[in-house]
Image: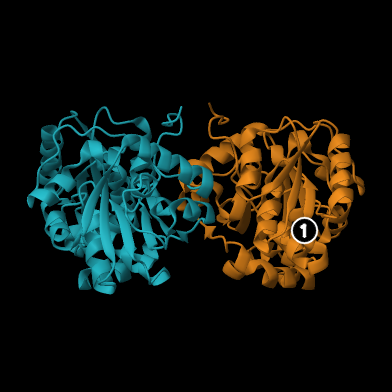
Chain colours: A orange, B cyan
Amino acid sequence: MQLIREAHERIRAKIHRTPVMTSEVLDGMAGNRLYFKCENLQKVGAFKARGATNAVFLLTDAEAAKGVVTHSSGNHAAALARAAALRGIPAYIVMPNNSPVAKQAAVRRYGGDIVLCEPTLAAREATARQVMERTGAAFIHPYDDLRVMAGQGTTAIELLEDVPDLDVILCPVGGGGQLSGIAVAAKDIRPTVRVVGVEPAGADDAARSLKAGQIIPMIEPRTIADGLKTSLGEKPFAEIIRLVDDIVTVREESIVQAMRLIWEVMKLLVEPSGAVSYAAIVEGRLSVADANIGIILSGGNLDLDRLPWQ
Amino acid sequence: MQLIREAHERIRAKIHRTPVMTSEVLDGMAGNRLYFKCENLQKVGAFKARGATNAVFLLTDAEAAKGVVTHSSGNHAAALARAAALRGIPAYIVMPNNSPVAKQAAVRRYGGDIVLCEPTLAAREATARQVMERTGAAFIHPYDDLRVMAGQGTTAIELLEDVPDLDVILCPVGGGGQLSGIAVAAKDIRPTVRVVGVEPAGADDAARSLKAGQIIPMIEPRTIADGLKTSLGEKPFAEIIRLVDDIVTVREESIVQAMRLIWEVMKLLVEPSGAVSYAAIVEGRLSVADANIGIILSGGNLDLDRLPWQ
């Protein structure tokens, strides 16, 4: 927990304190009081800004001078590019050569140096290694990294400051960086709060891993929530198995319905991955009533020309 | 100004204190510091919640018991229905029989009693009069009403509390209720702030009225910003001509571009009318640099199945 408190002090001036929003309409539908923590309104449009900023600003000056590197085609890539730009150091972002132009543009917008590679995991890892050897840059993993996990956990500090009497926190789970950080912080601040992970039924490795007591990797994830296709990391899993109360799965149609309700009623853009926590409410996966439920809206980056209800 | 302070005390527990959001990316594009006041995140998805709530709670118990009535197919209708429900009184909403099902659903969601009529202004006014005669309900005009204008002006109190050193405030203008209320409050709190109205070139009656020194009604408005098609009201115009520094017009393509940028970069759903203030920045209609600019995002209600870039 101390790492997360320190992370918050380190990054708070460099990120948004995102608002917690409420809706009478959605409360009425849910029969609970819902508190939406809007990480879709975070810098770079996702909670990833927290972990990447913490990792970059934890480097020594000597380490930092050589820059940072990661392989990611998603929100972590843009977050790392932005954090590196804030520190004035290079960010090498290894991306598959078939990654969408919009995602490459987001990385360039923050000054990231894109290194394209073949679209396989082996090529991504090999290319990242080459960049490290060539430049001496420090590798910052998107989730399997204690510095990143601590950064993501800062979300729970803010949420529980704003709403101290939460009964449940719902958080999406992909690689597990956010869920593990939030579980550590939330259980420290409020031991009675239930922390529940939510994932698509088509990418349910976290639910199966928690049940099995060991990581069961995702082979062929199938879900519209592209940010949650990754398999659980080892470091996050160690915290998840210790602290997370449950992991529930949701159907694809619930994710789309949840996303559309958040857009229509709350006027907030969330990406499919960002709507997954609320999908557990829409689908009635929580057997609670009249409770205070914190819901992490994790991100809002998506292609506005291809919406799931079109 | 005293009316606006009192309005704020009266309504503040019944509405959202909407956040003021910022974006490094949009600041960089604009060469100014932009402070977006998110009235799209207001109750019922628009600033109209402020004025309607103030008007409803200013009624005496005897007046209120008979209910309220308005003719509107837009955000004021939903706002009045919600405010009446809060007070536990009937709201009769006269709507044209061709108004979209979604807008009727929004009014019903808040418990409004819809009275359909032919889709002409004469029919709407006649029907509203019939409802008043039958029920004794109090008529609450969407903008040509001092109680409503005072409610809308509360936005400026909050904005200047959060960002005291604004140089300019940009606000959309349709009937003028919001612009006039904001001008009164803003000039009282910070006399040096410039208050600038923004409207679509295809519905530019406010710009022409300000120039002519008298109201020039809009005959055939043509704009995607459907909330701004109404002509200026007399009571708002009296304040606008006294206090507003300028009214600028923006092109349709700037409105769509502004709307899309707010969606993509800020992850906020705004309707076309709600993006009009920012369109003045996108189109470069303000000759300022390095300034603190408050931008009113006035609402976020639109049909997600029919987006302007599709």
Of residues B132 and A223, the one drawn nearer to the viewer in this rendering:
A223
Q: Is residue B128 above or below residue B6?
A: above
Q: Is residue B250 above or below residue B29?
A: above
Of residues B188 and A192, the one drawn nearer to the viewer in this rendering:
B188
Asked if residue A252 can be seen in this view, the reply is yes
Of residues B55 and B268, the one drawn nearer to the viewer in this rendering:
B268
Q: Residue furthest front?
A: A134
Quadrant of the snapshot with the N terminus of chain A: bottom right
Q: Is residue A131 left or right of residue B273?
A: right
**Amino acid at dot 1:** Val
The x, y position of residue B6, in whole percent, is: 26, 71
The x, y position of residue B90, in whole percent, is: 26, 49
Q: Secondary structure at mark 1?
A: helix
Instruction: Give the residue at x 57% y 44%.
Output: A270
| Residue bearing mark 1 | A148
Q: Is residue A12 above or below residue A115?
A: below
The x, y position of residue B55, in whole percent, is: 23, 59
Asked if residue A60 can be seen in this view, the reply is no
Instruction: Give the residue at x 87% y 49%.
Output: A134
